[in-house]
Image: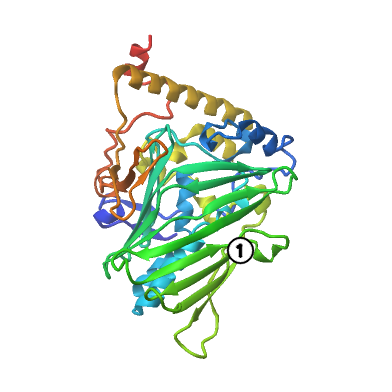
Amino acid sequence: MAKVKEQDSNQGLSEETSIEDPPERTCLPYLKGQNNVKVSMWSILKESVGKEIWKITVPVIFNEPLSVLQKCAGVTEYIDILDQAIAEPDEMKRFALVALQFATQYQNVERSGLSKPFNPMLGETFEYVVPGKYKYLAEQVSHHPPITAFVVLGDSGFVKYSTFQTKTSFGMGSICFTNIHNEYLELEKTEELFEWFPPTLGIHGLISGKPYIDLEGQGVVKDLSKPDEKYAVVKFYKRGWTSSSHQKVEIDVYESKDQKPVFRLEGKWSGEIQLKDLRKPHSKFEVIWKKAPYPENWQHQYGMTYHSIQLNYLPKQLKPFLPPTDTRLRPDQRALENGEFALAAREKNRLEEKQRAVKKYMEKEGITHQPKYFNQWLPRSSIMEDEQGNILYQYKYNGLYFEHDRLKQDWSGLPDLFGESLPEEVAKALQ
């Protein structure tokens, strides 16, 4: 079996660390039956119209064994597109590849978006490292409202980051989620900085019992290093009377304003996308991206892709290196993955009660939670406000996880989120 030698501080492991590279798993440990759920999701959601999704309590049977922190890691499934972009000398084709990566990063919700991921606890973290490729880190930086911050550090020289905070809207038999924050990408070699506003995710057909997923809306990818020049328009099509427009995406890449596009990309964000160089008179569409096949029995595995199946995998070689706040250590989520539904429900309730007790203690003592690995920041290009006029801060990685705590295996500043007992100071204060 191959050995992986983690050698530099950017990898986040000790220089002396040598671990076996565990094989990836091909399926979840428990294959969920098709007829386990007797209650429709709409029967629960219709009583919660007007609420944000994080305020809606659903039975654990409607959850999938992934947290929001892990769900956000779906952006890394085809992150190798950015490696191609960095190696591309043609500036405009590089921009087309960047737009392609933004447009394909949501493909993991195609069949898995019908289950609800676990709400992370305040201070919960999740890392996902592919040696020689990239490192991903997410942290739950706020609980009310729930806000997730994440970063992807590419070994080829890119940094991708965003703050995930959703706004929920309801329609007749449908529910839509929109991340209210932009996403950012830095390419170190070319000193390019890209910004993009993500599409709305819609779940439709809840009343009919035949739900399906759509990505909806039109967004613009901007190169903030040249804000008045190149940009790309990305259009996601909703399902119409026919299925021809379902999951369709079109991307037009412009070199400057008031000119025709120089690249055109079109296809399905859930299947295949083609690219055409419009600068060449006789160019033809060529396949630039194709989604990998789903695992066998995907319908019994929450509709997960092969990549998603790896996210909650906890091989024995990895466990000693993880912080106590890592999502893989959540007992309720682990129980659900193993098909132990009653245990999952009990553990979920216990963790929620523990979190409420800690929140009560913090309010009593006037303590404000401070994220460990992400700092508040305001992008100059787009400062946003909520309905009350309050500034909506975003969060940016501070370099303390992989480069310090993970390297030194020092987790002394992290809370006990999943243990059986309340923290001693909390238990005393609430007596």
Name the outermost residue toward the bottom. 282
Quarter of the figure with the N terminus = bottom left
Looking at the picture, the colour scheme in use is rainbow
Is residue 56 visible in the rendered image? The answer is yes
- Classed neighbour count for the residue bearing mark 1: other residues with Cα under 10 Å, few (<14), some (14–19), many (≥20): few
Q: Quadrant of residue 193?
A: bottom left
Q: In this view, does 410 lie to the left or right of 44?
A: left
Question: Tag count in the figure?
Answer: 1
Question: Which kind of residue does numbered mark 1 sit on?
Answer: Pro
Q: In which quarter of the image is residue 256?
A: bottom left
Q: Is residue 209 left or right of residue 412?
A: right
Does residue 140 sit above or below 253 in this rendering?
Answer: above
Q: Residue at x 44, y 39 (%)?
A: 327
The percent coordinates of residue 338 (x first, y second) are: 59, 39
The percent coordinates of residue 374 (x first, y second) are: 30, 43
Q: Residue at x 46, y 49 (%)?
A: 72
Q: Look at mark 1 in the image and give the residue it sits on.
A: 293
Q: Residue at x 24, y 43 (%)?
A: 408
Q: Residue at x 50, y 55 (%)?
A: 199
Q: In this view, does 92 lie to the left or right of 286?
A: left
Query: Which is more toward the observer, 303 or 397?
Result: 397
Is residue 59 visible in the rendered image? The answer is no
The percent coordinates of residue 363 (x first, y second) are: 35, 20
Name the outermost residue toward the front. 258
Query: Which is more toward the observer, 333 or 265?
Result: 265
The percent coordinates of residue 251 (x first, y second) are: 50, 69
Quarter of the figure with the C terminus = top left
Q: Quadrant of residue 247?
A: bottom right
Tag 1's secondary structure?
loop
